[in-house]
Image (cartoon, coloured by chain):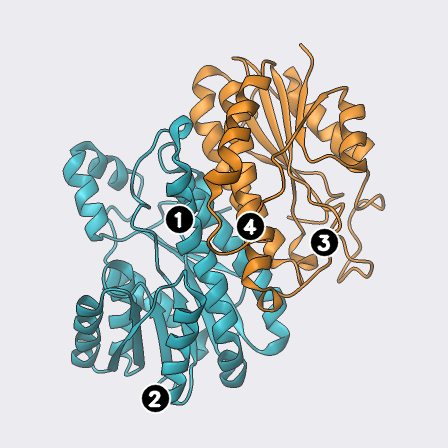
């Protein structure tokens, strides 16, 4: 099945996994709205989408601010005239800050809840009218942490699991409206992971050992196509699911 | 040692405390300003500190029930609703679960009771599911950490407050669905507190008559 070119908006797409998703969708000829706070980086990714064969656009978006999210969706509708898919990929800048469980800083968790969970709600709320019109879909970037829990990233694990709960609930609520909702749990090399490996060299071996495919994925080549699939018509009978794009690292039974 | 139940006050909590023969430690006061600018620390820091001092036992239950909420699609909830129904719930229970796991005596057991609608019964319950899954994962993290001092931390999920009147699909395996506080829920908590469950931690026991999977 070949999907018609779509118009999608991706939050947190100015780098990392979000950039990989944007480029994969761009390679399919789609119009990709790179929604991010960092204008320079967002515009650069939009240009990369152009080079990949799609149409790249940057739109300013602070996912914890209702007015900003609504304005971003409105900008897409104004210029592109439609919205076929949204990806909530934004993650708090504090997500990778390791904290012992018994010393968790409340402000840090609150920030993670705001970006990952409130951002999902605000994007869902703002995009629903457009997605109903296009019979579109939403994809949320979650993590294996939401299944396993984490000793030093308990707040991160919590918000990633909360996202899966939201995905399952929205799939039930939006299915009758013709809108699909799914999640992807990627394991990919990002700037944050590079920094983590550099700060703790043993971590790289530990992480790779548990991956049956033996390597950490690439955001554009390994994760982006999975999200493109979820957004495409090829996944039209798929909703409420979490696809683990992690080389088999976290096998859900 | 007398077991401790951390929960909101109300009839269901009273029933659970009675069935578990547990002392009740009430949760934090109502959020003062349920809006997007609400700062968690303002309302919760003092309570969390006080809660730590109340826990000196080897059996703790953290019951996160919020009774009486009607199903409502997520997109129809206002941002203030969202803060109250999701963010305030996560904030409150993260602190309670953290305090319970940290303060439970070595060799003890913490059980977190979470209302989690089954996939079939999730219509209009996205907010509740969001909170439930978040708390399950947080509990799992607590189990990873406090297992090192032989404290077990598990979850019991219930469907007491969100079960719809008209059930989709097949009937639940057990006709007692959604169960009662006194029997099904208290029984699951007691089982996980007991030595019979000495090898169980970081897991979810679904006390919902087999409705979810």
Q: Is residue A33 in view from this perspective?
A: yes
- Structural crowding at the residue carrying mark 2, measured as other residues with C-alpha within 10 Å and reported as few (<14), some (14–19) or many (≥20): few
Residue drawn at (24%, 58%) of the image: A16
* Cα–Cα gap, marks 2 and 4: 38 Å
Question: Does residue B169 sit above or below A149 in this rendering?
Answer: below
Residue drawn at (77%, 30%) of the image: B16
* Cα–Cα gap, marks 4 and 1: 20 Å
Label 1 marks a residue whose chain is A
* Cα–Cα gap, marks 2 and 3: 40 Å
Do the dots labelled 1 and 3 sit on one chain?
A: no
Question: Mark 4: which secondary structure?
Answer: loop
The residue indicated by pointer 1 is A112
Label 2 marks a residue whose chain is A
The chain assigned the colour cyan in the figure is A
The residue indicated by pointer 2 is A79
Q: Is residue B202 in view from this perspective?
A: no
The residue indicated by pointer 4 is B33
- Structural crowding at the residue carrying mark 1, measured as other residues with C-alpha within 10 Å and reported as few (<14), some (14–19) or many (≥20): many
Proximity of marks 2 and 3: CB atoms separated by less than 8 Å? no
């Amino acid at each position: 099945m070949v999907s018609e070119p779509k118009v999608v908006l991706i939050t947190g797409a100015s780098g990392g996994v979000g950039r990989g998703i944007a480029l994969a969708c761009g390679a399919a000829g789609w119009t990709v709205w790179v929604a991010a706070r960092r204008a320079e980086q967002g515009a650069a990714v939009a240009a990369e989408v152009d080079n990949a064969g799609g149409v790249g656009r940057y739109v300013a978006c602070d996912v914890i601010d209702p007015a900003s999210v609504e304005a971003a969706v409105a900008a897409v509708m104004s210029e592109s005239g439609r919205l076929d898919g949204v990806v909530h990929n934004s993650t708090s800048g504090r997500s990778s800050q390791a904290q012992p469980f018994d010393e968790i800083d409340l402000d840090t968790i609150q920030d993670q809840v705001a970006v990952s969970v409130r951002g999902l709600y605000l994007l869902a709320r703002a995009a629903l009218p457009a997605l109903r019109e296009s019979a579109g879909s939403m994809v949320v970037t979650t993590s294996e942490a939401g299944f396993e829990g984490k000793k030093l990233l308990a707040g991160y694990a919590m918000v990633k699991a909360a996202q899966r709960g939201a995905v399952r609930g929205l799939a039930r609520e939006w299915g009758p409206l013709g809108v699909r909702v799914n999640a992807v749990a990627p394991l990919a090399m990002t700037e944050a992971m590079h920094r983590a490996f550099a700060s703790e060299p043993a971590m790289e071996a530990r992480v790779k050992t548990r991956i049956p495919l033996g390597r950490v994925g690439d955001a554009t080549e390994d994760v982006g196509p999975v999200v493109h699939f979820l957004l495409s018509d090829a996944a039209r009978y798929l909703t409420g699911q979490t696809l683990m794009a992690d080389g088999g690292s976290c096998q859900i039974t | 040692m007398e077991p401790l139940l951390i929960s909101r006050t109300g009839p269901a909590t009273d029933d659970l405390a009675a069935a578990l023969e547990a002392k009740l430690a009430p949760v934090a006061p109502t959020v003062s300003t349920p809006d997007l600018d609400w700062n968690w620390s303002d309302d919760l820091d003092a309570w969390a500190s006080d809660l730590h001092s109340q826990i000196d036992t080897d059996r703790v239950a953290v019951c996160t029930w919020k009774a009486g909420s009607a199903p409502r699609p997520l997109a129809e909830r206002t941002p203030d609703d969202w803060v109250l129904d999701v963010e305030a719930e996560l904030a409150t229970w993260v602190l309670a679960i953290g305090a319970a796991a940290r303060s439970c005596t070595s060799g003890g057991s913490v059980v977190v009771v979470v209302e989690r609608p089954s996939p079939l019964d999730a219509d209009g319950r996205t907010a509740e599911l969001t909170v439930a899954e978040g708390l399950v994962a947080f509990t799992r993290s607590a189990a990873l950490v406090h297992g090192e001092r032989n404290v077990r931390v598990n979850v019991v999920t219930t469907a007491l407050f969100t079960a719809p009147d008209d059930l989709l699909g097949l009937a639940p395996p057990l006709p007692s669905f959604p169960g009662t506080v006194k029997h099904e829920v208290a029984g699951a908590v007691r089982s996980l507190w007991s030595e019979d469950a000495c090898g169980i931690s970081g897991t979810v026991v679904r006390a919902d008559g087999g409705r979810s999977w």
